[in-house]
Image (tube, rainbow, N blue to C red):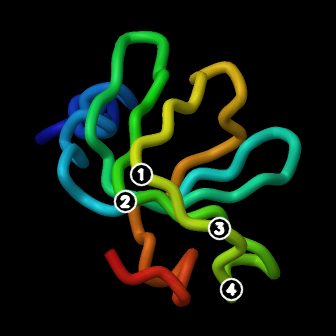
Amino acid sequence: MATAESKLIPPLRYLRGALGKPIYVRLKDGTEYVGILKMTDRTMNIVLSNTAELKNGGQAIAARYGDVLIRGSMILYISFDADKAAPAFTP
């Protein structure tokens, strides 16, 4: 029988598994971004492509950018279900 520990996926492996997929990122200052995860490193710095800055809890797009680098120490959380977190975003 498998233990609960054997089913855990390390966060970095989970993040790297999302490469090429849309993700939602909320920063500690409340800023929200959604974009395609292009790159990450061991300190959870991430690069998003086709990025949109969101407002109103992901309901509207405030601005569109190309590639954006987000420092890992500024990230509050990441959602891998970008469709629910940011319904206004279309890649």
User: Disc 4 to disc 1, how far (Cα)?
Assistant: 18 Å
Residue tagged by mark 2? Answer: 50
- Who's the residue at 54% across and 88% down the image? 88
- Which structural element holds mark 4? strand
Asked whether the residues under the numbered discs 4 and 2 touch, taking CB atoms below 8 Å apart as contact, a structural biologist would say no
Q: Residue 73 appears at what percent x and percent y?
A: 67, 20
Q: Specify which label sits upstream in the sequence, 2 or 3.
A: 2
Q: Amino acid at mark 4?
A: Ala
- Which structural element holds mark 1? loop
Q: Nearer the viewer, residue 47 or 78?
A: 47
- Which structural element holds mark 2? strand
Q: Residue 90 appears at what percent x and percent y?
A: 38, 83
Q: Nearer the viewer, residue 29 or 5?
A: 29
Asked whether the residues under the numbered discs 2 and 1 touch, taking CB atoms below 8 Å apart as contact, a structural biologist would say yes
Q: Amino acid at mark 1?
A: Gly
Q: Amino acid at mark 2?
A: Asn
Give the side of residue 19 with respect to residue 88, left or right.
Answer: left
Residue tagged by mark 3? Answer: 63
- Who's the residue at 77% across and 74% down the image? 55
Q: Hey, which residue is sitting farthest top in the picture?
A: 42
User: Disc 2 to disc 1, how far (Cα)?
Assistant: 5 Å
Residue tagged by mark 4? Answer: 60
Quadrant of the frame with the N terminus: top left
How packed mark 2 is, by other alpha carbons closer than 10 Å (few <14, some 14-19, many 20 or more), is some
**Which is more foreground, mark 3 or mark 4?**
3
Quadrant of the frame with the C terminus: bottom left
Residue tagged by mark 1? Answer: 66
User: Disc 2 to disc 3, how far (Cα)?
Assistant: 11 Å
